[in-house]
Image: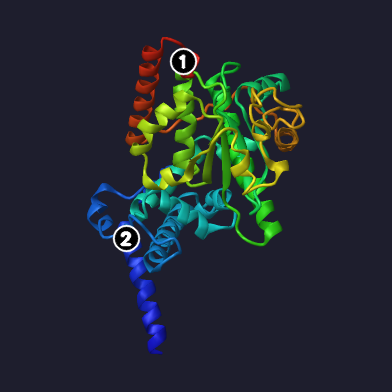
Amino acid sequence: TAAQSAINRSKGAHRNRAKHLLGTRLRTGDLQICSPRASDSESSSRNPKLESPPAAMGADSEDAVKQLSLLMEQVEAPLKRSFQGKDLSISCLFQNVHQGYLKETLVRFLKAREWNVSKAHKMIVDSLNWRIQNEIDSVLERPIVPVDLYRSIRDSQLVGLSGYTKEGLPVFAIGVGQSTYDKASVHYYVQSHIQINEYRDRIILPKLAEKFGRPVTGCVKVLDMTGLKLSALNQIKMLTSISTVDDLNYPEKTETYYVVNVPYIFSACWKVVKPLLQERTKKKVKVLSGSGKEELLKIMDYSSLPHFCRREGSGSSKHSSTDADNCFSFDHPFHKELYGHIKEQASHKELIKMGSLHVSIPEPDPNDAKIVEVIQAEFQKFGEENGSSNGHKA
């Protein structure tokens, strides 16, 4: 029929545009999925690039999702051929990323690249290569041992799951101001961070999606700035490594960042950094007054509030409550479950070499590197003006 012919022509047009954009190169033995070639720049310029896509998926954004989906399909066949029928394909590699929610995942990568199809495709391909080269799919089979080392990491890399929002999103609490990152090598901290990301994406979010009968693909984060000092400059490299891993491989996983217990030094930096951020990022960051309790109770129940938000002037986020309530503690149910899961997965595998997982850190985006420079300069300026290192206005 005429209608069917029109549909077929539309599909053909999408597929032709996808083929024109795609460049792949595969080396057997040393897997390398490649992004579009530089020579495709002319065709890339014809891709939809929506600087301000509509809040609801409109025609242009739907078109971008279709094109990106077709690009990923085009990589599938040559990858299968290169491994001579072995069970290794883009769909297998991508499964641990999208967990059955392919469209939502493509949208995340498109958002991260301002809806530019070619750039979003390159970002996915680069991320898949990173996962392959660093064996990320098996990171939940690599426990950090001995357990005392893991406990030390939990005491110096303050992060945990405090509960869920009223809409069902996980609430991750992060003790930015009091994380010292001084009990282990950088590799262990990066490994631990990736394990939490993967546990969130492979275990927590799929369970929530099954519970609610709808996709749950993100979370909210509450950042505690209690104790933020000039000495945080010493951790800039570590924090940049972790944020780069997240930006390039786990894009758009955080719906909102709530910043609480803010000292003057943060406020001063925020005024300088905020104008440098993309509008999309600025909208995600909410700097709250005091502990943020009043505002946070609008989106979550009291039981899900991080311990450092439960009362004004609660003091140290490390020691303000019992270990069972403190989601940073190794004795909190979340960390017990996470570590237990990793140990159980490891027990099903052959004995592997002990030691940290050395994950390669991608180069940060130039714009992000610039922001880090601005933060460093602002911290140094603050120190010179105040002649102190307590991080608070005199």
What amino acid is labelled 1 in the image?
Answer: Ala
Q: Quickly name the residue at label 2.
A: 48
Q: Is residue 369 above or below residue 252?
A: above
Mark 1 residue element: loop
Disc 1 crowd, CA 10 A, few/some/many (<14, 14-19, 20+): few
Left or right: 295 in relation to 321:
left
What quarter of the picture does the N terminus occupy?
bottom left
Q: Which of marks 1 and 2 is nearer the N terminus?
A: 2
Q: Is residue 293 above or below residue 42?
A: above
What amino acid is labelled 2 in the image?
Answer: Pro
Task: Tally the numbered discs.
Answer: 2
Towards the viewer: 34 or 230:
230
Q: Residue at x 73, y 42 (%)?
A: 303
Q: Which residue is drawn at 67% across and 23% down?
A: 150
Q: Quickly name the residue at label 1.
A: 394
Mark 2 residue element: loop
Tell me which corner region of the image, top left, top right, bottom left or bottom right, holds residue 270: top left
Left or right: 171 in relation to 369:
right
Q: How far from the left and from the top, in percent, is residue 312?
A: 64, 31
Tell me which corner region of the image, top left, top right, bottom left or bottom right, holds residue 62: bottom left
Q: How far apart are marks 1 and 2 (CA)?
A: 51 Å
Badge nearest the viewer, 1 or 2? 1
Q: Residue at x 35, y 31 (%)?
A: 272
Towards the viewer: 21 or 362:
362
Tell me if residue 233 can be seen. yes
